[in-house]
Amino acid sequence: MTRTSRLSRMFRLRGRGFVLLALTAATTALFPLVPSVAGHAGHAGHAGHAGHAGHAAPAPHLHSPLGQAAPPGAHHHGAPPASALGPAAPIGDPESPAPVVDLARSGWTATAGDEETAAEEGRAHLALDGNPSTFWHSKWSNGPASLPHSITIDMHRTAVVSGLTYQPRPTDIPNGRIGAYSIATSTDGLTFGAPVATGTWKDDGFVKSATFARPETARFVRLTATSEAGGRGPWSSAAELHLSGPANPAAHGAWGRTISFPLVPVATAVLPNNKLLAWSAFATDGFGGSNGYTQTAIMDLTTGEITRRRVDNTGHDMFCPGTAVLKDGRVLVTGGSNDRRASIYDPVTNEWTSTTGMNIPRGYQAMTLLSNGDAFVLGGSWNGGIGGKDGEVWSAASGTWRRLPGVPVKTTMTDDPAGPYRADNHQWLHAISGGRVLHLGPSKQLNWISTRGDGSITPAGTRADSTDAMNGNAVAYDIGKLLTLGGATAYEKAPATNRAYTVDLNGGKKPISARTGDMSHARAFSNSVVMPDGKVAVFGGQFTPVPFSDDRSVLTPEIWDPATGRFTPMASMAVPRNYHSVANLLPDGRIFTGGGGLCGGCTTNHPNGAIFTPPYLLNPDGTERTRPRLISTIPTRTAHGARLPVRTDTAIASFALVRAGAATHSTDNDQRRVPLTYRQTGTHAYELAIPTDPGVALPGTYMLFALDMRGVPSKAALLTLN
């Protein structure tokens, strides 16, 4: 049974009134789902609409283990044990696969038992070319070759291999999707042993995987197709093939178990009380209309408890909003399904309140906090009418909005074929001093924006040789330095790019953009997170962005190192994270990823999350490295320009502030990393210099990390810089 088929079966079970809760290091159990969470239990594949308009839904509690990576053999994919689902799985793809990482394909070649060369270009090497639009196809012209068909990968070196990933051909024509398969390995290309994996893949365009019964030392790996998934004919095809090997936690990180959520987390925000706020729409698993209420959940990062709550006192369906973490740690949410509304969540009181509605109705708009504590919003033609979504500013002092007629949205849009409806969505904004903002994407054109008075906008060049990159993202990894990743020239159904660029604001009036190393995989709808050491992790996405689809998913995260400009593959994800997914750095230095879908009865809803433990926290055997500790009491509030005394339990190489993020639709304009200067005042005693400029360190909630001489971060102290 493939990992994909296990996930599909998981969601069918969920539709019958069950959720999955990881309970121990080695088991995953099924528990009845109370109706207030599941809604209309029994509607296959659909969690229903929890509660009814005008009535607050109960607040159920879910407990999920947090923080620790799953040990070898533990469930990290959220599937129930085989005994709960019926017969044992076929050869390979065990119910408890060990973490894996993609093997580099440089120098690989492929041959096939037969291939189409007359009527189309369908040679075997196309399954290794990195382009999912090209594919190997078995011979079909002038009389098709009969099943079985095989394709053999020659790595031209010996490696330990433990799995294979299969990307079916593009979904416009499904012919040749592999159904029943077997996989065998060889060291010499002549003698292949008994199959190391067998099974049957579903007839859809999603990425498939097969985990071997045991790791194999091999040079050659042969995939043999014995049936066509849809029974359409004696054909086989493959757009891309990847091989994976056992992951080294110290090099590739590790994943914890899948955490069940009572909703699809489409938007998330890290709170100053060590909790994670998440919400979906008026429904836990779908959206539509302007319903005036929102399903929310809060995960306590200390206990793992997840509490669901329906918010209807603000009259705001907060699906597809703009978000900003305010200077006092509250979260401002604007527009979306109720396109003029604006709401504020206060983590101190655990209450939602309304603030003045925007002048311009919006959905899919971008927001950022400004250096003075106000908030700037731009774009958002997904809702409230198409076009004219010019800039406006929310005042923290008065709670009212001010139009910026000098900041027209038109000059910031991409050249999307759908026009403004898509072209002004999900903009990348980076606030600096004096109420100014750099607009650096997703359009290839960069712009300086001033929010003073009526506002103004000035061209700031292009992002080097980048095209438009809708549904990519940008991350501030150092002071005045940003990394942009992925995206596509159109919102959907256009090839994504694997390119990444740096944008440096420290060289004068014009930002300096340069292409850095490419990602191993093209991605749109991915999420990126800056880590305490200045590296950037990217998760999920698709080769070709298609909303509400897991077709052509990228399951391999990557980490970019600013010192080398290179990306390194990490341990593979178990669940695709595409449209409507999120990622956030957590105060313990790990990273939460979750969500995807929100399409009602579809099979691509992912009401769950998982926590990734980066390599800097792990030993090669998967145990946690000894971490430095902040042993002095860190104040919960501090001011710009302050000198902050800190004591630790060991020698420290660096300190960094990382601003708490608020993520939705691949965009998180709130996160930024601010490395701190310091002086040593004694043994393991330091005085940190908090930046004086609120344009360098925006007001708001920060995580303070200390990193030791090995680059291992402490658990963060949470503080508000205001």
Image (cartoon, rainbow, N blue to C red):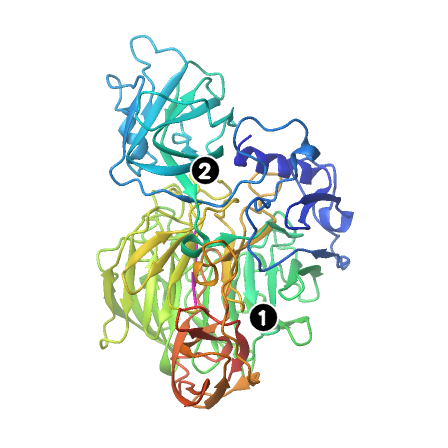
- Is 527 inside the magenta-drawn segment? yes
Residue 17, image x and y in percent?
Answer: 73, 41
Amino acid type, mark 1: Leu
Give the residue pinned by disc 2.
Answer: 551
Does 276 appear above or below 347?
above
User: 710 or 658, which is in the foreground?
Assistant: 710
Q: Which residues are magenta?
A: 526-531
- Is 540 inside the magenta-drawn segment? no
Q: CA distance from mark 1 to mark 2?
A: 33 Å
Amino acid type, mark 2: Asp
Does 699 appear above or below 584?
below
Residue 449, image x and y in percent?
Answer: 34, 73
Q: Secondary structure at mark 2?
A: loop
Residue 708, image x and y in percent?
Answer: 42, 73
Residue 454 falls in image quadrant: bottom left
Say left or right for 262 vs 588: right
Asked whether the residues under the numbered discs 1 and 2 touch, taking CB atoms below 8 Å apart as contact, a structural biologist would say no
User: 346 or 460, which is in the foreground?
Assistant: 346
Of mark 1 and mark 2, the one earlier in the sequence is: 1
Q: Quadrant of the N terminus?
A: top right
Residue 403 seen in this snapshot: no
Q: Write the residue at 74% across / 45% down.
A: 31
Q: Main secondary structure of the magenta part?
A: strand
Residue 485 falls in image quadrant: bottom left
Q: Which mark is residue 271?
A: 1
Does 536 appear above or below 234?
below
User: 198 or 591, which is in the foreground?
Assistant: 198
Q: Secondary structure at mark 1?
A: loop
Q: Write the residue at 53% across / 35% down.
A: 4
Residue 433 falls in image quadrant: bottom left
